[in-house]
Image (spheres, rainbow, N blue to C red):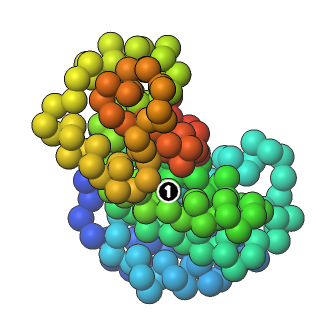
Amino acid sequence: MSGTEMPSLEPTAADDIKPTIKAVASLTPIVGGAIAEYLDTVIKDRRSDRIEAYIQALEKRVGDLEINIEDLKLEDSETHIIQEGFIAASRTPNQESIEQVANVVFASLQANDEIQARSRVFIRLLNSYEIRHFMLLERFCKDQTVQQKAAIKYGLKTASELDKAYIAQLVADGMLIAPPAGWDGVSNTMHHETSKLGRDFLKAVAWKFA
């Protein structure tokens, strides 16, 4: 998706990622060794600047709560989500997407199994969605005020052929559904409405509405 573009880097050598590995280890002392080993063996050739930006974003969210990461006593499922965040962050082209990944991962820490499962789905979707997907999810929200603002801001009064391709993906992912019978909002005329999962997704990534 568009946003503040991150600088393009060539694949890094093993020595270039050592500062990142140390940062991860200091961020998560309980599982730092395992994550550091994971980085060293799996993400060695990926763009370390993006991974470092993700670490900093995640660390900031923990710091804002004025808690020590050591006190979280992370479970295996939580460290797995953190690791998935590394992969997602290494693939994203901009800082905005990295912040979204960090938002989803942070929300999953010490959450129940359902939220963690949902977070893993959201992380995977962040790697495949473009900004147009987010615009359409906002455009199809049931709140007519939100719809109207999005329609004007994004020029989405009608769905183009390209938009229909995006919509088909959102429907397949469960982000859009058919509007309920009797609903007479703008979304009904376009035959879709943002599902609860879609609304939760926008909330989880802290999407800024029009």
The structure residue drawn at horizontal position 48% and vertical position 26%, both measured from the top left corner, is 182
Residue 95 placement: quadrant:
top left
Tell me: residue 123, above or below residue 13: above
Res. 29 visible in picture: yes
* Nearest to the observer: residue 160 or residue 127: 160
Residue 65 image point, x, y percent: 80, 45
Above or below, 3 relative to 122: above
Measured as percent of width and height from the top left, residue 136 is found at 35, 34
Marker count (numbered) = 1
Place of residue 166 in the rendered image (x, y in percent of width and height, measured from the top left): 26, 45
- Quadrant containing the N terminus in the rendered view: top left
User: Looking at the figure, which quarter contains the C terminus?
Assistant: top left
Q: Compare residues 95 and 13 and report the one nearer the observer.
A: 95
Residue at image position (76%, 72%) is 74
Task: Please state which of residues 104 and 5 is positioned toward the viewer in this rendering.
Answer: 104
Query: Are there few (<14), some (14-19), or many (20+) residues within 10 Å of tag 1?
Result: many
Circle 1: residue type: Phe
The picture quadrant where one finds residue 172 is bottom left
Q: Nearer the viewer, residue 81 or 189?
A: 189
Name of the residue lying farthest toward the left: 161
Q: Secondary structure at mark 1?
A: helix
How far from the left and from the top, in percent, is residue 122?
A: 50, 56
**What residue is at 54 percent from the left and 65 percent from the top?**
120
The vertical placement of 40 against 87, above or below, is below
Q: Is residue 146 left or right of residue 130?
A: right
Q: Which residue corresponds to mark 1?
A: 122
